[in-house]
Image (cartoon, rainbow, N blue to C red):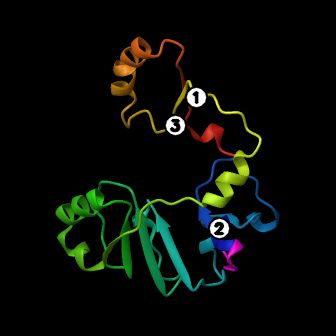
Amino acid sequence: PEALARRGHDVTVGGDFPPNVPHGPEGHRAGYCSRADLTRPGAEMFDVAIYFKCPELADPKLAPRLYCWTDQERPLVPDPFVKVAACSNYLARVLTSLTPRVASRLTVLPYGIDVDEVRQAGKGVLRDPLEVLHCASPDRGLVDFLRLWPRVLAEIPDAHLTIAYGWDLFD
């Protein structure tokens, strides 16, 4: 959202945020607001609504054009969306096999990063070439990763592993 805002777009992110996400007056701060704020009676309509990982929340009263961007391997109802974007070719194939009628609306839009922002954030940061970071949901390969970790240590005994994930780390 920040990258879109820097490009001049008016961006509001709505969702079921955990309590530690700060909200200002009427639930707004830094472009974030609760889903209840977005759908309250009299709420302003947006030009476009993009749903990430939550196609079941699509609300045509929120915007005349709805898009879905997902990284979830689960069936979805494509009808309310102008486009459905999968984060990989693999996921596009999975979605098409789960819900064949999604094919006509499907595109692939990989995750991306703002390289300049990453470079700027990394200036002056000392890197530890022996640290390995696992920051995916534990149900996404952590057990297999931990089973293989002794092989890493056999080759690089000074390597160390940091595991980080969860809303409690959100800021």
What secondary structure prevails in the magenta region?
Answer: loop
Q: Are marks 3 and 2 in contact (CB under 8 Å)?
A: no
Residue 15 shown left or right of residue 154 in the figure: right
Please, is residue 126 above or below residue 91 in the view? above
Q: Which residue is mark 1?
A: 129
Q: Which residue is mark 3?
A: 135
Residue 53 shown left or right of residue 22 in the figure: left
Q: Amino acid at mark 1?
A: Pro
Q: Secondary structure at mark 2?
A: helix
Mark 1 surroundings within 10 Å by alpha-carbon count, few (fewer than 14), some (14 through 19), many (20 or more): few
The percent coordinates of residue 78 (x first, y second) are 31, 74
Residue 81 appears anywhere in the view: no
Decide which of tag 1 and tag 2 comes sooner along the chain.
2
Quadrant of the rendered image containing residue 106:
bottom left
Q: Which residue is mark 2?
A: 3
Please, is residue 110 above or below residue 10 in the view? above
Residue 102 shown left or right of residue 11 in the figure: left
Decide which of tag 1 and tag 3 comes sooner along the chain.
1
Quadrant of the rendered image containing residue 29:
bottom right
- Count the marks: how many? 3
Q: Amino acid at mark 3?
A: Cys
* Range drawn in magenta: 6-11
Task: Determine the CA span between mark 1 and mark 2.
Answer: 29 Å
Residue 25 appears anywhere in the view: yes
Decide which of tag 3 and tag 2 comes sooner along the chain.
2
Q: Amino acid at mark 2?
A: Ala
